[in-house]
Image: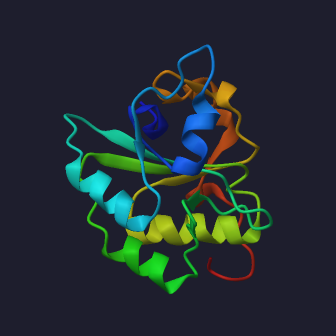
Amino acid sequence: MPVTDHPPLNVASPDCAKAFYAGLHPRCVRLHHAAGLADLRRVLARHRAAGLITLDLIGHSTRHHHLLRLGATPIDMLNPVVARFFRTLTLPPTIAAVRLLGCETAVSDAGRRTLRLLAHALRIPVYGTLAPLLKSHSNADGFDPAFRHLLVEAAALPTGAGRW
């Protein structure tokens, strides 16, 4: 089973969750909210899973760098506060991968660098998106596996002259 097919733990920035998933068809029914890194830590501390899961962080991306935002906090591994948070974060052993589900989180240099550094810090696969995400890319469980072609793993990203 590809790692992105594990059931998701959906954690969304509150500024996008309600409006984004509203509509006639139920989408992302089990949704936790995190308006920042402290909220994310609390969600992870409360979560218990019987088997392997994928941590889906859901939010808008920043305008130019396409970095995923949780509340007002961009997930930018060049930000010392963000980098320290993820380096010291103890993930539950059931989390097999992380996906940054915002628009085009794997297309900019800054986004690709963050994906690589996040994967290095967490020591698990980290995925970003190659296209804008719409609510139609989700089903009742969260991100629809039919659209996994919109994801790219940090390890598969092309590298430039530098390590990251």
One can see residue 100 in this view? no
Q: Is residue 108 left or right of residue 73?
A: right
**Rendering coords of residue 159 (x, y %):** 70, 70
Q: Is residue 135 left or right of residue 73?
A: right
One can see residue 6 in this view? yes
Q: Is residue 130 left or right of residue 41?
A: right
In the foreground, 103 or 125 = 103
In the foreground, 99 or 71 = 71
Quadrant for the N terminus in the image: top left
| Vertical order, 162 against 93 (above or below) | below
In the foreground, 57 or 51 = 57
Residue drawn where x is 68% and y is 83% of the image: 162
In the foreground, 21 or 57 = 21
Q: Is residue 90 left or right of residue 87?
A: left
| Vertical order, 22 against 111 (above or below) | above
**Rendering coords of residue 153 (x, y %):** 58, 52
Residue drawn where x is 34% and y is 39% of the image: 53
Residue drawn where x is 46% and y is 51% of the image: 98
Residue drawn where x is 71% and y is 49% of the image: 103
